[in-house]
Amino acid sequence: MTKIAINGACGRMGLTVAKCALEDKAFEIVEALEAAASPAVGRDYGEFAGRPSLGVTVTRDMGSKAEALIDFSTPEASLERLLECVKRARPHVICTTGFTPAQRQQIEVAAKHIPIVLSSNMSVGVNVLFKVAAEVAQALGPAYDLDIIETHHRFKKDAPSGTAKTLAEEIEKATGRKPNIAAVRSGDVVGDHRVVFGSIGDAIEIRHTASSRDIFAKGALRAAAWLTRAKPGLYSMRDILA
């Protein structure tokens, strides 16, 4: 059984991770972390996770019980927890997006000391999309325009999404061309990414639609279990799926 800590434990994705972990006997939630100003601090996590009691108090401070930390929060909060993970030699699954190049460099430095998974999207399907989209773009060649259209719920802060940026990066690596990205924020859309290859005469579209946040949470849990056996280094979901 893998003992996990969740940062951003009472947020939308933190609670999804908790739900999936509670349904899977291979995982145990031992720490629930939130910002100091959160009204959840000091209360039993079961109140938020839909259980009468879990015996886990929501806290600001990281303890030493967990084998890995799963982090769906903000870039600033993730980096703060990263320093604590290095101090405690704890693996860190970073599911947060929107890092600046300087912040990304901090993660790379930390990865010399602890194992880290950093991914713009924890879904198995999306990580296959990264690979396939690049291969299709390369095969089609310069006669086809390259466009990415991503749609998320109205509360998502970063635009374009980290997933769209990764798609663009993978395609650029394969072709030397930068795709156009259009970002839409609407309603309660979990996540929708379309890659459109258009020429004069035809078009090809590859699309991934997330209908449940569970796919991201389950990917993060899989990453956490994998990291407990990994050496220090910076990994992606591709390493886990290999």
Image (cartoon, helix red, strand yellow):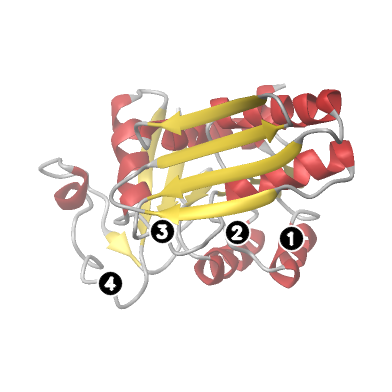
Reply above or below: 41 against 18. below
Mark 3 or mark 4, earlier in chain: 4
In the rendered structure, are the residues bearing label 2 and label 3 in contact, judged by CB atoms less than 8 Å apart?
Answer: no
Residue visible at 82% across and 44% down in the picture: 172
Mark-to-mark CA distance, 2 and 4: 21 Å
Under tag 3, what secondary structure?
loop
The spot of residue 106 in percent (x, y) is 73, 67
Which residue is the site of mark 4? 38
Q: Which mark is residue 85?
A: 2
Q: Of circles 1 and 2, which is in front?
A: 1
Image x and y of residue 79, in percent: 60, 67
Q: Earlier in the sequence, mark 1 or mark 2?
A: 2
Q: Position of residue 62 (x, y in %)?
A: 45, 62
Residue 126, visible in the rendered structure: yes
Query: Which element carries disc 2, helix, strand or loop?
Result: helix
Residue type highlighted by circle 4: Ser
Which residue is found at the position 60% from the left and 26% from the top? 206
Mark positioned earlier in the residue sequence (2 or 4):
4
